[in-house]
Image (cartoon, rainbow, N blue to C red):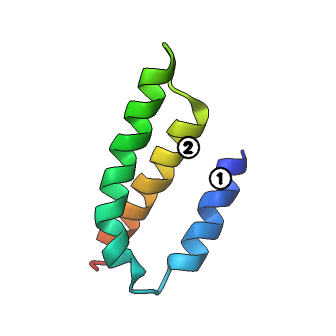
Amino acid sequence: MEWFWVSVVVLAIFLGTRLLKAMRRTARFLIWTFLVAGANQSQFVDPAAFGGALLALETLLLARWRHV
């Protein structure tokens, strides 16, 4: 549940800023980094890695939605 609030805060910070353009490339990198790290740690995906990947994916989708 804490990842929901983290994502809400991040969205509030980055909405309306031009940082999304730079974050778009970073978000792609973070998605793969967190998912690979989570998959390599154990048989199941690590919740922190999965949450980080979701946060990066949300940033990427927001950047596309805003056509940055």
Distance, label 2 to label 1, CA atoms, is 9 Å
- Where residue 49 sits in the image (x, y, percent)? 52, 38
Q: Quickly name the residue at label 1.
A: 4
- Where residue 28 sits in the image (x, y, percent)? 31, 54
Q: Which of 41 and 55 is in front in this view?
A: 41
Report how many numbered discs are placed on residues in the image.
2
Q: Earlier in the sequence, mark 2 or mark 1?
A: 1
Q: How crowded is mark 1: few (under 14 residues within 10 Å), some or many (20 or more)?
A: few
Q: In this view, does 25 lie to the left or right of 51?
A: left
Q: Residue at x 45, y 86 (%)?
A: 17
Q: Is residue 4 above or below residue 62?
A: above
**Within the image, what quadrant is residue 40 found in?**
top left
> What type is the residue that disc 1 sits on?
Phe
Question: Which numbered dot is residue 36?
Answer: none
Q: Residue at x 51, y 16 (%)?
A: 42
> What type is the residue that disc 2 sits on?
Gly
Determine the secondary structure under disc 2: helix
Q: Which residue is drawn at 50% across and 80% down?
A: 15
Q: Quickly name the residue at label 2.
A: 51
Whether residue 65 appears in this view of the structure is no
Q: Is residue 47 left or right of residue 19?
A: right
Q: Residues within 10 Å of mark 2 (few under 14, many from 20)?
A: many
